[in-house]
Amino acid sequence: MGNEPIVGPNDDRDAESHSEATAETEAETGADADIDTETDGGVRPYTVRLELVDEPGELLRALSPISDNGGNLLSIHHERGNITPRGHIPVEVDLECPPERFDDIVEGLRDAGVNVIQAGAERYGEEISVVFVGHLVENDLSETLSRIEAEAEAAVLDLSLAAPDGTDATSSARLRLAVDSGRTDAALESIRSIGADKDLTIVEPLLGGEA
Amino acid sequence: MGASQRLAILGAGDVGRSVADLASEYGHEVVALADSTTATIDPDGIDVAAALDRKLGGDDIGADDPTAVFETDYDVLVEATPTTLGDADPGFTHAKRALETDHHVVLANKGPVAERYGELRELEADSAGSIRFEATVGGAIPILSTIEDSTPQAVTAVRGVLNGTANFILTRMAAEGLDYEHVLAEAQDLGVAEADPTFDVDGTDAALKFVILANVLADGGFSLEDATVEGIQNIPGSALNLAAEDGRTIRLIGEATRDGVRVGPRLVPENGALAVTGTRNIVQIETRNAGSLHSSGRGAGGPETATAVLSDVGRLPPL
């Protein structure tokens, strides 16, 4: 199971373009980033990881924002055998574009409703949803969120709050979190302990198996 | 089908009565049926219909002493007395007595298998008889025999919904947007929830089943106190609504591995296999070599659970 290349013009990409991409990313943060850009003719390779709903036409829909914004597709790895915790199919896309266009591409993907779980150096391996129940507002919701970002090392992507009986009664919140690859269990453990501290009930996602 | 066996049934609740009622259909004979106060015993086979009529009419089940059941000539003791925690008695002592005298034991009672698994297996090792307990986990659903067929070593985890009452409540809450208390009252009116539903809604009943599963996977070592257990009493209707916005729902999910047991409300995909509705149960058996197997069905009820007892009886060798 795992990677099933649909389009793979450069099958040696793991050996070559990947290390190249890593080198570029490292270089970017260094002092000679500008020189690299010049020698490359202003075009750089990027990898974006997407989550697609398993429906016909989804892949095509997800790729058009890339070409529409001046990106050049290098390869697509459509991991049909893998399902993300949200029940979607992970897709890894290698592309080339001028650095100034890359943000437009990511924005274009998000505008098209495509879930981008990793773009360039922002490496988010997993997205998970968690529901919190309790006196969320009275117990300082924003402090809870800060603690999640700090202690669980998770980025809060969105939050949906329901307080049908008023903010001083029991309320519920659903959080969508981005967590580094392989750190989901550790993040959930931190979230459990934050929940215990703040007297909140945490409804975690069931991650194992084909739930 | 296995050889015809002579059954001594302890416990005349829904399960014990159904086992007695269905035994002949499965080719077995009932030589004793006892509740906590009286028994009816006949080495040539009791008159099951008459005994059940007496029991349901509020009379004594028979004129014999329940302890005399152990003195009669039987092959299989069917332990269907109510589940108790801690020392799991009298169920454990019943099983012990049968094994020590070289009889088979089929348990519908979760207590001994969840709380004193190691001791039961030691008694079994010294006995000509065997123990089986399919009925303790998921009623009619063949979960333990599936694990046995896959061999426990090749099973990496068992997850699922094994409490119909909690599942019914969560399903109704999600469908009607109602709160816990309201739906619980409705479930009690319908007879889905007991007058005292504590063990179902606080996760204890599901935890006992997953403790049994962990014991089977790891060959012992677990009891209820090793399980991490949370119930559904704190889940408001609004939490289910929020979950639904994201294509999820909340179910009381248990997980058993060789490392531990955990039961609690979890987010699962709304259309996923584990999001069974109503009182239906489901388990997902994750195997090393064959992917995930799913088994779903009725996890409770007298005749349903009795079929699991009688399947166990059919798997026993002649003594």
Image (cartoon, coloured by chain):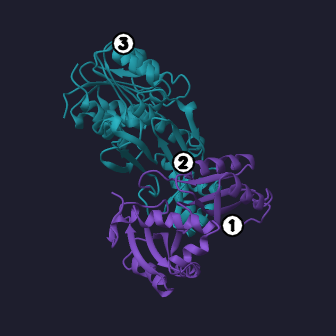
Chain colours: A purple, B cyan
Marker count (numbered): 3
The relative height of residue B43 versus residue A203 in the rendered view (above or below) is above
Q: Which of marks 3 and 1 is in front?
A: 1
* Label located before the other in sequence (3 or 2): 3
Q: Nearer the viewer, mark 1 or mark 2?
A: 1
Q: Can you tell which quarter of the image residue B33 is in?
A: top left
Q: Which residue is drawn at 31% across and 22% down?
A: B130
Residue A164 coordinates in the image, percent (x, y): 71, 67
Q: In this view, does B49 lie to the left or right of A18?
A: left
In the rendered image, which residue does mark 3 sit on?
A: B100
Nearest to the observer: residue B250 or residue B54: B250
Q: Which chain is indicated by disc 1?
A: A
Q: Residue at x 34, y 43 (%)?
A: B288
Q: Nearer the viewer, mark 3 or mark 2?
A: 3
- Mark 3 → mark 2, Cα distance in angstroms: 38 Å
User: In terms of secondary structure, where does tag 2 sit?
Assistant: loop
